[in-house]
Amino acid sequence: MPRTKEQYEEMRNATRDKIRSAAMQLFVHQGYGSTSVQDIADTAGISIGLLYRHYRTKDQLLNELVGYAVEGLKRNIRSFESDQSPKQLIAQFIDEVYTDLSNGEELANLLILINQALFASAGTDSQLHEEILQVNARLLDATAQLIRKGQQLGEFRLGDAKEMAVYFYASIQGLAEMKILLKSNFQMPSPSVMTAFLFKVGE
């Protein structure tokens, strides 16, 4: 039967999702340089010709994935710069991290992919590479400011806010890497454990 324009668009989006998912999995598990376009097509279950209809190069695919991850970081910055309670913002963020890392690999893969894009310049657009550095710095500053605000309100433990922000993201990055490494043996720490260094005891 003839397909409508909407049906074609749904099929196109579904194919692109399969390609992105396959590429992200392969880039993370075996490295960008060791992944061929044929590997991506095989993992996605499509022909290499169909893959090239959506992405002209492997670089284009990597840059789209990294760009998607960067947009997620920007949303976090905007959230942390809002007027909501610092404790509520951190709790909501940690709940989302907990859910994502408990239920799938997408967040873990995205976090690892961003690091790969920083340390392995091959394949990453130079402008995007610079944007990753800038956004990471902004996110760290926004988090430190949020922690200072929470300390002033008596919601958070006292301490150097910048150091606490660094520790905060280092723990999340470490959990992402452990999830990929340990696979089914990975056990996600509870939100209360993840925020114990920050939230005051009994609150």
Image (cartoon, rainbow, N blue to C red):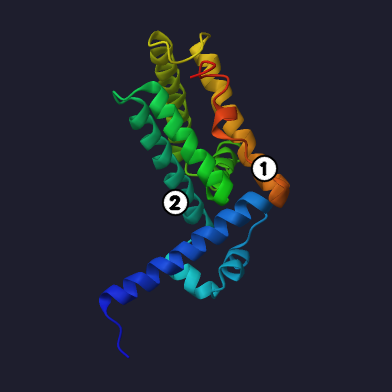
Residue position marked by numbered label 1 in the rendering: 187
Q: Is mark 2 in CB contact (under 8 Å) with mark 1?
A: no
How many neighbours does mark 2 have within 10 angstroms: few (below 14), some (14-19), or many (20 or more)? some
| Camera sees residue 24 | yes
Residue nearer the viewer, 49 or 75: 75
Q: Position of residue 195 (x, y in %)?
A: 54, 25
**Label 1's element?**
loop
Tell me what residue is drawn at x 57 percent, y 33 percent.
172
> Could you say which quadrant of the image residue 6 lies in?
bottom left
Residue 64's tag is: 2
Q: Image quadrant of residue 114?
A: top right
Residue at 45%, 30% in the rendered image: 91
The residue sitting at the front extreme is 202
- The residue sitting at 54% across, 33% down in the picture is 191
Amino acid type of the residue tagged 1 in the rendering: Gln
Instruction: Report the amino acid beneath label 2.
Output: Glu
